[in-house]
Amino acid sequence: MVGVVGAGIAGLCTALELAARGCEVTLLERAAVPGGKLRQNGVNATGGAGGVAIDAGPTVFTLREVFDQVFRSAGTRLEEHLQLRPLSVLARHAWDAGATLDLHADSERSAAAIRDFAGATEAAGYLRFCADSRRVYETLDHSFMRASEPSLGGLIAHAGLRGLPDLFRLRAFSSLWAALGDYFRDPRLRQLFGRYATYCGSSPFSAPATLMLVAHVEQAGVWQIDGGMHALARALHALLLARGVTVRCATEVRCVQLHAGRVTALELADGERLRVDAAILTCDAAAVGAGLFGAAAAAAAQPVSPSERSLSALTWTACVPTSGFALLRHNVFFCGDYAAEFDRILVQRQLPQQPTVYVCAQDREGPAALAGGRPERLLCLVNAPPIGDSHDFGSEEIAQCLTQTLATLQRCGLRLLATPDQLQPTSPTDFNRLFPGSGGALYGQATHGWRASFRRPGARTRIPGLYLAGGSTHPGPGLPMAALSGRHAAHCLLQDRGLTAH
């Protein structure tokens, strides 16, 4: 039997792939429901917990083809389980003094919007940026992201002689921020596209320019899931049950047990010993390296120092009315000094004084205004230092950051018609409690420097029968990447058993 630890997207996809190949699988999750970071908070319009369910984790669904393959491998089709709708406007971006810019799924429409916003030179730079981001994506897609055990040598070998010029054009040795200067003179546009580094919990001033591939990923399709993002976890969970997988929630794994150097059992927090012949851990790999699954299993992953962690976040969920700004589903409100924001978070290890704020307005179906100023479901997020295991973010500190967050929103024209007690916070301390061993880091190791992507652990470990998956492993964070990591782990296990994955 295979024990899969963690029912986030990686664990759900791993278990489904193995079950489709006839493996006996037990999926173990310490939380009360599956989903992992793909979670929901319940809030009341009058404040406090309960009532209305709001997506409180990932809010952007991209690379649909990854999930099409996940469902096909299980003998079904994604559209039989989920209703997806493509967004024509990817996000609305705002700065002080009422400046706004929408990015569209159609790059020509985005170029026209940028022309109106910042001039023809910047629009031309944007189209060059789109072409280069596509080349980066196409170069790295199969040679790196979909490779189960990537290496620089393997990347070069896969590219071949014809592809070597593309590898040199990847600008892996440049920071994203520096590379953006070749396309955009307007600092607001560098700020906008530099934000792609935060998708993997990194600073645009230190992350490699290869992260510009996110632009192409979004142009290929951003989707809205009816019922919210958590519906994806529910659909995968239902498929697992239908395929005979045992799913045990509210079940914590304390230790991976070995005999003669191989995995033999999982010891649970209540003392139960679950016999397995292989285990796949889909938690943050840092937790494994820190010994949270036992000293013997710690050899499967390198410890991650606090300085190497990705960003954490301070989030608020609420169901409140808004005024003064035409929200779309995805909205970003920028601070005035991006460099100071990241210095404050990653160097000074403090909450930002002037934060950039992401707002997901989950009742917005399109550009049409919400009727009557009625309460709407909101997730507000600011980046935060990943020190939730060494610093307790108290109510006063959180309240101060909330005041600064609301000030950013108001400078850009948005008012939340709410009292502070109507906004339910989740701090890095809370994220560390939800995901032990992470310090609250939400994306594993930070992707800083060109070597960072090659430092992420792969699926196979040095311990026979023990595998890793999840957003902290290769190919990295984000829903489709976590799903790919789960499939990598399942395929490696099947290959090691002499079976062929499909």
Image: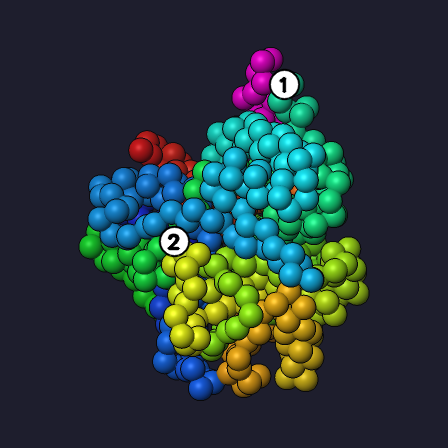
In-image side of 293 versus 40 (left or right): right
**Viewer-closest of 386 and 262:** 386
Q: Which residues are magenta?
A: 150-163
Q: Residue at x 50, y 68 (%)?
A: 379
**Residue matched to label 1:** 164
**Residue 36 circle label:** none
C-alpha gap between disc 2 and disc 1: 37 Å
**Viewer-closest of 116 and 399:** 116
In-image side of 267 versus 152 (left or right): left
The mark total stands at 2
Q: Residue at x 58, y 18 (%)?
A: 163
Quadrant location, the C terminus: top left
The quadrant in which residue 337 appears is: bottom right
Q: Is residue 179 above or below residue 40?
A: above
**Viewer-closest of 62 and 233:** 62
**Residue matched to label 2:** 224
Residue 155 highlighted magenta (yes or no): yes
How far across and down, in percent of the image, does residue 253 sit?
Answer: 44, 65
